[in-house]
């Protein structure tokens, strides 16, 4: 019988967070989930080739892709990787970041907001972003070409 109760640290009496939120257990859990895909992906392809798919109009690739996404969704919650777990109103110290730099992205100009995005109850705000590689920063025009002339990868916080 499988239990939904999280496995907790032995150090505490109260269950503060699951064991998979901390290294090395987080890495072991993620690696085992990803390694399981070596067996699962061919199995799903074979299963949906021989038996009916959830929707007749879906190809094998679409069916397996949807199954893959659904199978991987719990990974974020199990390892504490949820986007809702971070405070989007606080700047992150550069000392806390290993390979990225933190920046605030300015809101879009109101003249660019159109269609259903135009609403009196909604106003544009600054959003946190992380730039890789660390120290590259945004270009002069705020674009993705960094100061060094190389392309930067920007991830919204």
Image (cartoon, helix red, strand yellow):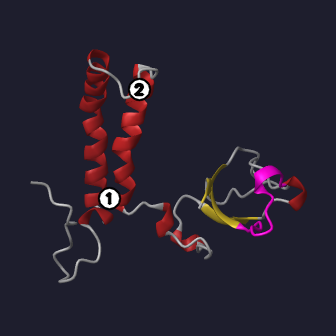
The one nearer the camera, 136 or 104, is 104
Residue 140's image quarter? bottom right
**Mark-to-mark CA distance, 1 and 2:** 29 Å
Q: Are marks 1 and 2 in contact (CB under 8 Å)?
A: no
Q: Position of residue 111 (x, y in %)?
A: 90, 57
Q: Position of residue 142 (x, y in %)?
A: 80, 55
Disc 1 designates what residue? Answer: 78
| Label 2 element class | loop
Taking the magenta stretch, the answer to whether it contains residue 61 is: no
Could you classify mark 1 by the number of other residues whose Cα lies within 10 Å: few (under 14), some (14-19), or many (20 or more)? some
| Chain-order first, disc 1 or disc 2 | 2
Q: Position of residue 118 (x, y in %)?
A: 81, 58
Which stretch did the figure color magenta? 113-126
Could you classify mark 2 by the number of other residues whose Cα lies within 10 Å: few (under 14), some (14-19), or many (20 or more)? few
Taking the magenta stretch, the answer to whether it contains residue 124 is: yes
From what the image shows, is residue 83 above or below residue 64? Answer: below
**Which residue sits at x=39%, y=55%?**
76
The one nearer the camera, 24 or 74, is 74
From what the image shows, is residue 91 above or below residue 138? Answer: below
Disc 2 designates what residue? Answer: 55
Residue 56 seen in this snapshot: yes
From what the image shows, is residue 102 above or below residue 65? Answer: below
**Which residue sits at x=44%, y=20%?**
59
Residue 147 seen in this snapshot: no
């Amino acid at each position: 019988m499988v239990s939904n109760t999280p496995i907790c640290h032995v150090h505490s009496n109260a269950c503060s967070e699951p064991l998979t939120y901390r290294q090395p257990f987080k890495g072991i859990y993620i690696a085992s989930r990803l390694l399981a895909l070596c067996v699962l992906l061919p199995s799903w392809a074979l299963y949906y080739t021989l038996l009916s798919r959830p929707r007749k109009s879906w190809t094998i690739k679409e069916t397996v892709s949807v199954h893959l996404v659904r199978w991987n969704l719990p990974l974020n919650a199990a390892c504490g990787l949820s986007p809702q777990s971070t405070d989007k109103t606080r700047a992150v110290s550069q000392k806390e970041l290993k390979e990225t730099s933190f920046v605030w992205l300015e809101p879009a100009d109101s003249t660019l907001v159109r269609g259903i995005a135009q609403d009196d109850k909604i106003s544009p705000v600054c959003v946190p972003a992380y730039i890789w590689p660390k120290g590259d920063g945004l270009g002069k025009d705020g674009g993705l070409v960094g100061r060094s002339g190389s392309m930067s990868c920007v991830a919204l916080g």
